[in-house]
Image (cartoon, rainbow, N blue to C red):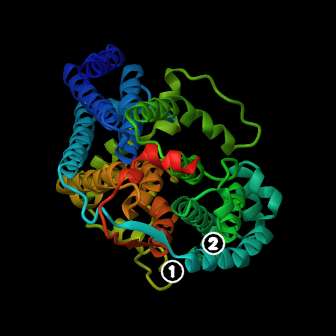
Amino acid sequence: MPPLACLALAGVLLLTENIADVWVLVVAAAGALLALIGAIQSASHGLRPVAAAFYTFWFAWLGVGPIVQISINRVAWADSSILSDSGRVSSALLLSLVAVASFWVGDRFGRNRGIRNSGAVASTRGWVIGLLVGILAVIAPLAIRVTGISNYFVSRSERAGVLGEGGNTYSDLGGPLYAVYTILPMTISISILLLALHAIRMSWRGIRFVRGGYVFASMIGFVGICVFANPLSQSRFIALTAFGSVLLLLLQPRSTRAGFSFVAIALFAGVLIYPLANSFRYAGTELRDITASTFASADFDGFQQVVTTMSYVEEHGITWGIQGLSAALFFVPRSVWPAKAEPAGGTIAEFAGYSFTNLSLPIHAEMYLQFGLIGVVAGMAALGYISSRLDTAWLHAPMSKLAVFAPYMAVVMFGILRGPLGGQVPVYLPVLLLLAAGLRSTATSSPPTETWRPDALVKAAT
């Protein structure tokens, strides 16, 4: 661990060498270093995937991004006025440091607590899988009829144009009906595939003994995510959530070696693949070279949104949770709840005067917007604690219900961190609810045996 920490420190110092303001340099370096050390700790004693995903994306998006932007004095949309006030810049960096430190404290606190009912096994409710397959069989043809099957394999901008021409946009259809056509088929497909794969894994006694119904369901789910969650017509975060969670559930990476591989891949993806993947959004877009300007593009707009959020709160005050409540109750139509808030990223972007308001908003900035500094500390600590409980179950109770949630939550963490909640929760929460409905904890008569160990599970499967 110490050699890796020293290497992390050297890397962060190299990144920050062009920052002239000493205080800004110290705070920016501290935030990036803490995220990098947290990522190393999430792998050093076995992979803790949820925390590892948080720390690696934080380092790339809110560590490297702001440091490069300050170094070259440039942010997205040529809004360099954001960087002209060193006081605002240092305050935003300090808020980010407090946020990642609070997550770290919650994460460490959660690791020191045992898993209750560690002998419980998560079994699958077969009837729930069957019900979901039936629902998907009804709504998938409706969704495909609206868009056309070929338009699920074009760029996001082209697909949005098709929806607009057909009068099938969010404003035309309304939230609930739009969700049926665009979000529900995807969330049901992911849920079917994760539940079916877990059922196969739990009952594995060889290929000849696999139940045909679970194989059929997993095939339906896989076809569903290939159509409704592919990276061409969906966002990078949705595609990653669908395919990444399935990959983690299949591979079951838990060793220290797997942990460092996960961290290395996640860091590489966050710094390089993440900005390149945006090329799928527009038709005819060519892959760009990765330069310093890449980290001042719209893909790395998180830091300037933090700065603007603090300015918004200073002028208008906190919002007392209306955006979070609106996100949690996303299924309530606006006709029933006229005061329902729009996603907070748009509010902050409009305040900044940007013409394009469908923007990100880091999770801690949204917590600050709604509840101030206390909300940041409490919310990020709670998020770290929840992540730790999932990771501990993943390592020490791999057959438990929490362990089944861990692969999905690991990849969801990228989208939750990017925000805003109003845009992310309607996509991610339904899958969590469906997984909770499809799983039940069954107490065992004896504590976990050697077959609970990852290496023994692999041997049993082979």
Asked if residue 360 shows in the view, the reply is: no
In three-dimensional space, the C-alpha distance between marks 2 and 1, rounded to whole angstroms, equals 11 Å
User: Residue 136, image x and y in percent?
Assistant: 68, 74
SS state under label 1: loop
Residue shown at 19% from the left, 45% from the top = 105
User: Residue 81, image x and y in percent?
Assistant: 38, 33
Q: Earlier in the sequence, mark 2 or mark 1?
A: 2
Q: Amino acid at mark 2?
A: Tyr
The residue that label 1 is drawn on is 333
User: Residue 253, image x and y in percent?
Assistant: 46, 42
- Residues 43 and 376: in front is 43
Q: Is 153 on the left or on the right of 407, as rendered?
A: right
The residue that label 2 is drawn on is 178
Total count of labels:
2
Q: Residue furthest bottom?
A: 336
> Image quarter for residue 147?
bottom right
Asked if residue 294 shows in the view, the reply is: yes
Residue shown at 32% from the left, 13% from the top = 17
- Residues 119 and 11: in front is 119
- Residues 354 and 239: in front is 239
Q: CB atoms at circles 2 and 1 under 8 Å apart?
A: no
Q: Amino acid at mark 1?
A: Pro
